[in-house]
Amino acid sequence: MMKYRIRHITEYEYAARVSHCYNLAHMVPRTTLRQTCEQNRIAIAPHASFTAKREDYFGNQSFHFEIQRPHEKLVITSESEVEVSPQKTALNLDLGVTCFDARLQLSESKDPEVLFAREFLLDSSMVKVNEDLREYALPSFEEDRPLLSAVSDLTRRIFEDFEYCPESTTVATPLTEVLKNRKGVCQDFAHLEIACLRALGYPAKYVSGYIETLPPPGKEKLVGSDASHAWISVYSPREGWFEFDPTNNQISGDQHIITAWGRDYFDVTPLRGVIFGGGEQPLLKVSVDVARI
Protein backbone atom coordinates (compact mmCIF):
# COMPACT_ATOMS: atom_id res chain seq x y z
CA MET A 1 0.00 0.00 0.00
CA MET A 2 1.37 3.42 -1.00
CA LYS A 3 0.29 6.74 0.48
CA TYR A 4 0.90 10.05 -1.26
CA ARG A 5 0.54 13.71 -0.36
CA ILE A 6 -0.13 15.82 -3.45
CA ARG A 7 0.21 19.58 -3.66
CA HIS A 8 -0.85 21.21 -6.93
CA ILE A 9 -0.50 24.99 -7.29
CA THR A 10 -1.78 26.90 -10.31
CA GLU A 11 -1.00 30.62 -10.52
CA TYR A 12 -2.18 33.19 -13.06
CA GLU A 13 -0.70 36.69 -13.23
CA TYR A 14 -2.76 38.99 -15.44
CA ALA A 15 -1.46 41.88 -17.53
CA ALA A 16 -4.43 43.98 -16.47
CA ARG A 17 -7.03 43.84 -13.73
CA VAL A 18 -9.72 41.14 -13.94
CA SER A 19 -13.12 42.35 -12.75
CA HIS A 20 -14.58 38.87 -12.14
CA CYS A 21 -14.14 35.25 -13.23
CA TYR A 22 -15.96 31.92 -13.36
CA ASN A 23 -13.99 28.68 -13.15
CA LEU A 24 -14.27 24.88 -13.25
CA ALA A 25 -11.55 22.69 -11.72
CA HIS A 26 -10.81 18.95 -11.66
CA MET A 27 -8.24 18.79 -8.87
CA VAL A 28 -9.78 16.27 -6.46
CA PRO A 29 -8.40 12.72 -6.96
CA ARG A 30 -11.01 10.04 -7.62
CA THR A 31 -11.75 7.18 -5.29
CA THR A 32 -11.59 3.94 -7.31
CA LEU A 33 -11.09 0.23 -6.68
CA ARG A 34 -7.33 0.84 -6.44
CA GLN A 35 -7.08 4.26 -4.83
CA THR A 36 -8.79 6.21 -2.07
CA CYS A 37 -8.75 9.98 -1.71
CA GLU A 38 -8.61 10.30 2.06
CA GLN A 39 -8.71 14.08 2.14
CA ASN A 40 -8.61 17.11 -0.10
CA ARG A 41 -8.49 20.84 0.49
CA ILE A 42 -8.68 23.57 -2.16
CA ALA A 43 -7.61 27.13 -1.29
CA ILE A 44 -8.27 30.10 -3.58
CA ALA A 45 -6.69 33.54 -3.48
CA PRO A 46 -8.30 35.98 -3.63
CA HIS A 47 -11.20 34.54 -1.67
CA ALA A 48 -13.95 33.09 -3.87
CA SER A 49 -17.41 34.67 -3.79
CA PHE A 50 -19.03 31.29 -4.54
CA THR A 51 -17.87 27.65 -4.47
CA ALA A 52 -19.62 24.37 -5.18
CA LYS A 53 -18.55 20.74 -5.52
CA ARG A 54 -20.45 18.19 -7.55
CA GLU A 55 -20.00 14.85 -9.30
CA ASP A 56 -19.99 15.19 -13.08
CA TYR A 57 -21.37 12.80 -15.71
CA PHE A 58 -18.24 10.63 -15.58
CA GLY A 59 -18.20 10.41 -11.77
CA ASN A 60 -15.36 12.93 -11.35
CA GLN A 61 -15.35 15.46 -8.52
CA SER A 62 -15.65 18.89 -10.12
CA PHE A 63 -15.17 22.17 -8.28
CA HIS A 64 -16.86 25.41 -9.39
CA PHE A 65 -15.88 28.83 -8.08
CA GLU A 66 -16.46 32.47 -8.83
CA ILE A 67 -14.50 35.58 -7.87
CA GLN A 68 -16.59 38.72 -8.17
CA ARG A 69 -14.03 41.30 -7.13
CA PRO A 70 -11.17 42.96 -9.03
CA HIS A 71 -7.89 41.04 -8.96
CA GLU A 72 -4.59 40.89 -10.86
CA LYS A 73 -3.49 37.45 -9.67
CA LEU A 74 -5.22 34.10 -9.10
CA VAL A 75 -3.73 31.23 -7.09
CA ILE A 76 -5.44 27.86 -6.64
CA THR A 77 -3.83 25.35 -4.29
CA SER A 78 -5.13 21.79 -4.08
CA GLU A 79 -3.73 19.52 -1.35
CA SER A 80 -4.70 15.85 -1.22
CA GLU A 81 -3.79 12.61 0.52
CA VAL A 82 -4.32 9.47 -1.53
CA GLU A 83 -3.81 5.79 -0.74
CA VAL A 84 -2.98 3.55 -3.71
CA SER A 85 -3.22 -0.25 -3.54
CA PRO A 86 -0.74 -2.32 -5.55
CA GLN A 87 -1.91 -4.58 -8.35
CA LYS A 88 -2.76 -7.96 -6.82
CA THR A 89 -1.57 -9.90 -9.85
CA ALA A 90 0.56 -8.98 -12.86
CA LEU A 91 -1.43 -8.42 -16.04
CA ASN A 92 -0.86 -11.24 -18.54
CA LEU A 93 -1.06 -9.57 -21.94
CA ASP A 94 -1.12 -12.90 -23.80
CA LEU A 95 -4.46 -13.96 -22.33
CA GLY A 96 -7.94 -12.59 -22.75
CA VAL A 97 -10.30 -11.72 -25.56
CA THR A 98 -8.88 -11.33 -29.06
CA CYS A 99 -9.15 -8.19 -31.15
CA PHE A 100 -11.79 -9.78 -33.39
CA ASP A 101 -13.89 -11.13 -30.51
CA ALA A 102 -13.68 -7.81 -28.67
CA ARG A 103 -15.15 -5.91 -31.63
CA LEU A 104 -17.82 -8.58 -32.12
CA GLN A 105 -18.94 -8.40 -28.49
CA LEU A 106 -18.87 -4.60 -28.52
CA SER A 107 -21.16 -4.53 -31.55
CA GLU A 108 -23.61 -7.24 -30.43
CA SER A 109 -23.77 -7.19 -26.62
CA LYS A 110 -26.67 -5.46 -24.85
CA ASP A 111 -24.91 -5.60 -21.49
CA PRO A 112 -25.21 -2.17 -19.75
CA GLU A 113 -21.46 -2.05 -19.12
CA VAL A 114 -20.75 -2.58 -22.81
CA LEU A 115 -23.37 -0.02 -23.84
CA PHE A 116 -21.73 2.55 -21.54
CA ALA A 117 -18.27 1.70 -22.89
CA ARG A 118 -19.50 2.30 -26.44
CA GLU A 119 -19.92 5.99 -25.60
CA PHE A 120 -16.12 6.12 -25.70
CA LEU A 121 -16.08 5.06 -29.36
CA LEU A 122 -17.50 8.38 -30.52
CA ASP A 123 -15.54 11.39 -31.69
CA SER A 124 -15.10 14.07 -29.03
CA SER A 125 -14.06 17.71 -29.17
CA MET A 126 -10.32 16.97 -29.11
CA VAL A 127 -10.23 13.44 -30.55
CA LYS A 128 -11.36 13.09 -34.16
CA VAL A 129 -10.58 9.79 -35.88
CA ASN A 130 -9.47 9.57 -39.51
CA GLU A 131 -8.02 7.04 -41.90
CA ASP A 132 -4.39 8.08 -41.23
CA LEU A 133 -4.79 7.28 -37.54
CA ARG A 134 -6.44 3.97 -38.36
CA GLU A 135 -3.59 3.06 -40.72
CA TYR A 136 -0.98 3.94 -38.10
CA ALA A 137 -2.66 1.71 -35.47
CA LEU A 138 -3.55 -1.25 -37.68
CA PRO A 139 -0.19 -3.16 -37.67
CA SER A 140 -0.55 -3.86 -33.93
CA PHE A 141 -4.04 -5.34 -34.15
CA GLU A 142 -4.02 -8.75 -35.82
CA GLU A 143 -7.47 -10.33 -35.57
CA ASP A 144 -6.39 -13.30 -33.44
CA ARG A 145 -4.06 -11.32 -31.17
CA PRO A 146 -5.19 -10.71 -27.56
CA LEU A 147 -6.55 -7.17 -27.38
CA LEU A 148 -4.41 -6.12 -24.41
CA SER A 149 -1.27 -7.38 -26.14
CA ALA A 150 -2.18 -5.28 -29.18
CA VAL A 151 -2.78 -2.18 -27.05
CA SER A 152 0.56 -2.72 -25.30
CA ASP A 153 2.26 -2.90 -28.69
CA LEU A 154 0.57 0.32 -29.85
CA THR A 155 1.68 1.98 -26.59
CA ARG A 156 5.27 0.90 -27.28
CA ARG A 157 5.18 2.16 -30.86
CA ILE A 158 3.91 5.61 -29.83
CA PHE A 159 6.67 5.77 -27.21
CA GLU A 160 9.33 4.86 -29.80
CA ASP A 161 7.98 6.80 -32.79
CA PHE A 162 7.19 10.13 -31.10
CA GLU A 163 9.48 12.59 -29.32
CA TYR A 164 8.48 14.13 -26.00
CA CYS A 165 8.93 17.85 -26.67
CA PRO A 166 7.16 20.30 -24.29
CA GLU A 167 7.31 23.32 -26.59
CA SER A 168 6.11 21.55 -29.73
CA THR A 169 2.33 21.68 -29.20
CA THR A 170 -0.47 23.55 -27.44
CA VAL A 171 -3.85 22.32 -26.22
CA ALA A 172 -5.24 23.43 -29.60
CA THR A 173 -2.80 21.41 -31.74
CA PRO A 174 -4.80 18.94 -33.89
CA LEU A 175 -3.92 15.24 -33.91
CA THR A 176 -3.18 15.39 -37.63
CA GLU A 177 -0.27 17.72 -36.85
CA VAL A 178 0.96 15.55 -33.97
CA LEU A 179 0.90 12.49 -36.23
CA LYS A 180 2.77 14.36 -38.97
CA ASN A 181 5.47 15.98 -36.81
CA ARG A 182 5.93 13.03 -34.41
CA LYS A 183 6.32 15.37 -31.42
CA GLY A 184 4.20 16.26 -28.42
CA VAL A 185 3.54 15.87 -24.71
CA CYS A 186 1.59 13.41 -22.59
CA GLN A 187 -1.80 14.91 -23.51
CA ASP A 188 -0.99 14.56 -27.22
CA PHE A 189 0.18 10.95 -26.87
CA ALA A 190 -2.93 10.04 -24.85
CA HIS A 191 -5.20 11.66 -27.45
CA LEU A 192 -3.27 9.90 -30.23
CA GLU A 193 -3.64 6.45 -28.69
CA ILE A 194 -7.32 7.05 -27.90
CA ALA A 195 -7.96 8.11 -31.52
CA CYS A 196 -6.14 5.04 -32.84
CA LEU A 197 -8.19 2.72 -30.63
CA ARG A 198 -11.50 4.36 -31.46
CA ALA A 199 -10.68 4.30 -35.17
CA LEU A 200 -10.40 0.50 -34.94
CA GLY A 201 -13.57 0.10 -32.85
CA TYR A 202 -12.19 -0.14 -29.30
CA PRO A 203 -13.56 2.20 -26.57
CA ALA A 204 -10.92 4.35 -24.89
CA LYS A 205 -10.94 7.00 -22.14
CA TYR A 206 -8.63 9.90 -21.39
CA VAL A 207 -7.25 9.65 -17.84
CA SER A 208 -5.88 12.73 -16.05
CA GLY A 209 -3.87 12.65 -12.86
CA TYR A 210 -0.37 12.71 -11.43
CA ILE A 211 2.74 10.59 -11.67
CA GLU A 212 5.44 10.46 -9.04
CA THR A 213 8.91 11.16 -10.41
CA LEU A 214 12.04 9.90 -8.68
CA PRO A 215 15.38 11.79 -8.73
CA PRO A 216 18.59 10.23 -10.02
CA PRO A 217 20.52 8.18 -7.41
CA GLY A 218 22.25 10.45 -4.92
CA LYS A 219 20.23 13.52 -5.91
CA GLU A 220 17.55 15.29 -3.91
CA LYS A 221 14.11 15.64 -5.37
CA LEU A 222 13.37 19.21 -6.46
CA VAL A 223 10.29 20.94 -5.07
CA GLY A 224 7.65 21.27 -7.79
CA SER A 225 9.39 18.76 -10.06
CA ASP A 226 6.47 16.36 -10.33
CA ALA A 227 3.78 16.89 -12.94
CA SER A 228 0.19 16.46 -13.85
CA HIS A 229 0.00 13.61 -16.32
CA ALA A 230 -2.28 11.93 -18.85
CA TRP A 231 -2.67 8.34 -20.01
CA ILE A 232 -5.43 6.13 -21.45
CA SER A 233 -7.85 3.42 -20.43
CA VAL A 234 -9.15 0.84 -22.92
CA TYR A 235 -12.20 -1.39 -22.51
CA SER A 236 -12.01 -5.15 -23.03
CA PRO A 237 -15.41 -6.92 -23.01
CA ARG A 238 -16.02 -9.15 -19.96
CA GLU A 239 -12.65 -8.05 -18.55
CA GLY A 240 -13.09 -4.33 -17.82
CA TRP A 241 -10.94 -1.22 -18.24
CA PHE A 242 -7.13 -1.31 -18.44
CA GLU A 243 -4.77 1.67 -18.27
CA PHE A 244 -1.71 2.23 -20.45
CA ASP A 245 0.76 5.13 -20.42
CA PRO A 246 2.15 5.87 -23.91
CA THR A 247 4.45 8.64 -22.66
CA ASN A 248 6.38 6.14 -20.54
CA ASN A 249 5.58 2.88 -22.39
CA GLN A 250 4.07 1.14 -19.40
CA ILE A 251 0.91 -0.20 -17.85
CA SER A 252 -0.15 2.35 -15.24
CA GLY A 253 1.01 1.37 -11.78
CA ASP A 254 1.34 2.48 -8.17
CA GLN A 255 2.94 5.80 -9.19
CA HIS A 256 -0.09 6.80 -11.29
CA ILE A 257 -2.71 8.73 -9.31
CA ILE A 258 -6.04 9.36 -11.03
CA THR A 259 -7.81 12.70 -10.74
CA ALA A 260 -10.47 12.34 -13.44
CA TRP A 261 -11.39 10.58 -16.66
CA GLY A 262 -13.49 11.47 -19.66
CA ARG A 263 -13.58 11.47 -23.46
CA ASP A 264 -10.57 13.78 -23.82
CA TYR A 265 -8.63 16.58 -22.10
CA PHE A 266 -11.49 19.05 -22.39
CA ASP A 267 -13.71 16.89 -20.12
CA VAL A 268 -11.13 16.81 -17.32
CA THR A 269 -9.09 20.02 -17.66
CA PRO A 270 -7.47 20.74 -14.26
CA LEU A 271 -8.62 24.37 -14.49
CA ARG A 272 -10.56 26.35 -17.07
CA GLY A 273 -12.91 29.27 -17.00
CA VAL A 274 -13.94 32.70 -18.19
CA ILE A 275 -12.43 36.02 -17.11
CA PHE A 276 -13.61 39.57 -17.70
CA GLY A 277 -10.65 41.86 -18.33
CA GLY A 278 -7.08 40.67 -17.84
CA GLY A 279 -5.46 42.21 -20.90
CA GLU A 280 -3.09 40.05 -22.93
CA GLN A 281 -2.23 36.38 -22.35
CA PRO A 282 -1.67 35.84 -18.59
CA LEU A 283 1.52 34.39 -17.14
CA LEU A 284 0.83 30.83 -16.00
CA LYS A 285 2.87 28.94 -13.39
CA VAL A 286 2.13 25.36 -12.31
CA SER A 287 3.89 23.48 -9.52
CA VAL A 288 3.17 19.87 -8.54
CA ASP A 289 4.64 17.86 -5.68
CA VAL A 290 3.85 14.17 -5.17
CA ALA A 291 5.43 12.87 -1.95
CA ARG A 292 5.24 9.46 -0.29
CA ILE A 293 4.09 9.56 3.32
Image (tube, grey):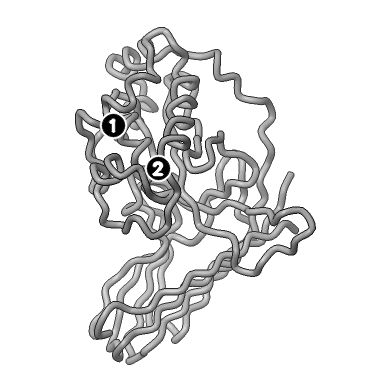
Numbered badge on residue 259 = none
Which image quarter is the C terminus in?
bottom right
- Residue type of the residue flagged with mark 2: Ala
Res. 52 image quadrant: bottom left
Q: Position of residue 241 (x, y in %)?
A: 47, 30
Kindly report which numbered mark, 2 or 1, lies closer to the viewer in this rendering.
2
> Quick check: 132 left or right of 35?
left
> Quick check: 199 left or right of 93?
left
- Secondary structure beneath disc 1? helix
Instruction: Tally the marks.
Output: 2
Labels 2 and 1: the sequence-earlier one: 1
Judge the density around disc 2: few (<14), some (14-19), many (≥20) Cα neighbours within 10 Å: many
Of residues 192 and 255, the one drawn nearer to the viewer in this rendering: 192
Q: Position of residue 64 (x, y in %)?
A: 38, 68
- Residue type of the residue flagged with mark 1: Leu
Residue hosting label 1: 121
Q: Position of residue 200 (x, y in %)?
A: 29, 23
Q: CA distance from mark 2 to mark 1?
A: 15 Å
- Seen as rendered, the residue at the extreme right is 218
Q: Position of residue 60 (x, y in %)?
A: 43, 52
> Quick check: 52 left or right of 225?
left
Which image quarter is the N terminus in?
top right
Residue hosting label 2: 190
Q: Does residue 148 lie above or below 187 as drawn?
A: above
Q: Does residue 129 lie above or below 91 as drawn?
A: below
